[in-house]
Amino acid sequence: MIRYAKPTTVDEALALLGEGAWRILAGGTDFYPAQGAKPFRDNVLDINGLAALRGIAETDDHFVIGARTTWTDLIRHPLPPAFEALKQAAREVGSPQIQNVASVAGNLCNASPAADGVPGLLALDAEVELRSARATRHLSLPDFILGNRRTALRPGEMVTAIRVPKLAAAGASAFVKLGARRYLVISIAMVAARLVVENGRVAEAAIAVGSCSAVARRLAGVEAALLGLPGDGGLDGAIQSAPITELSPIADVRGSAEYRLDAVREIVARAVLTAAGPMNDHMVAAA
Ligand SMILES: Cc1cc2nc3c(=O)[nH]c(=O)nc-3n(C[C@H](O)[C@H](O)[C@H](O)COP(=O)(O)OP(=O)(O)OC[C@H]3O[C@@H](n4cnc5c(N)ncnc54)[C@H](O)[C@@H]3O)c2cc1C
């Protein structure tokens, strides 16, 4: 017989997870479309009763996004400008109806190459907190999302939070999503860029691209090319000539691999120039 449980405490949820195999249900916006009309075969652990996992808190070292925090919760929560890329991504996940129920953590656990939340979190060096009845572990995002629809989640574990180190929440950021239309669209490619500009020069650059590889990737070559440049000049030129070796886009109904690679350089430039600040606005408009 299939079980359905809706625990109200995390300990109760972890105890249940230790007892057998469960599928976790959060906002259901990936869960139900994947289920379709098929009969349920697995136990369902509904985490919507876990009030403790909803919301964003701060510790000395981290911003902690609880696993049941919705995109709308994130948009409404005051956060430093480094989170702007993630907030912009949140505003572009589906529609407000989706954003009101869907969780940030569900987006990571579903591990779609086109998950809009991943680049912004990669640019913030985010970690995933995983708990079972016996242990807690923290994995960096690249160690958690292993491939298309594959994560490092083990039987008996659930994601309880996403943590952003305060050291990485520096500077300003921007997100650019390329889709075939403005809203309710699966990304052809998307970019989150976070820049720290000190004394007029780029001191830190974190740039991540999604939908152009099985898992969203940071662009180390572009990041290195930007370091030390003036925040108000030369960024676009450096991006156009920097090596991009991390991406391996597929061709599908949304675009060819060549188109994706071409488009990525352009949207990287737009995201970086926006993150760099108002002095670059004329260049973004011209791009
Ligand atoms: C109309 C529509 C439009 C959409 N548009 C976008 C879009 O523009 N961009 C985008 O990125 N996505 C989009 N999505 C996909 C989806 O809304 C997001 O990925 C969302 O963030 C998933 O969160 P959820 O809470 O609904 O997850 P659920 O559907 O509840 O769960 C997703 C998966 O994660 C697992 N899971 C959830 N929480 C946990 C946890 N705490 N621990 C372990 N496993 C867990 C579930 O078992 C399931 O496998 C769209 C979906 C729909 C239906």
Image: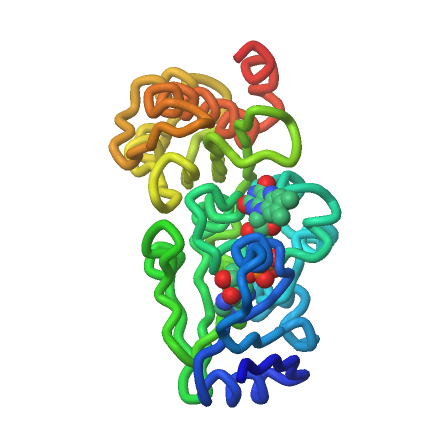
**Vertical position of residue 230 compared to residue 101: above or below:** above
Foreground pick, 44 / 189: 44
**Left or right: 152 with respect to 46?**
left
Question: Where residue 73 sits in the image (x, y, percent)?
Answer: 71, 57
Q: Which quadrant would residue 3 be assigned to in this image?
A: bottom right
Residue 50 or residue 20, whichever sits in front = 20
Q: In this view, does 277 lie above or below 8?
A: above
Query: Relative to residue 223, is residue 34 depicted above or below?
Result: below
**In which quarter of the view is residue 96 placed?**
top right
Q: Residue at x 54, y 69 (%)?
A: 40
Left or right: residue 221 compared with residue 133? left
Residue drawn where x is 46% and y is 27% of the image: 254
Q: Can residue 62 be seen by looking at this rendering?
A: no
Query: Of 156 and 86, which appears nearest the observer?
Result: 156
| Residue 233 placement, left or right of 104 | left
In the rendered image, the residue lying farthest to the top is 286
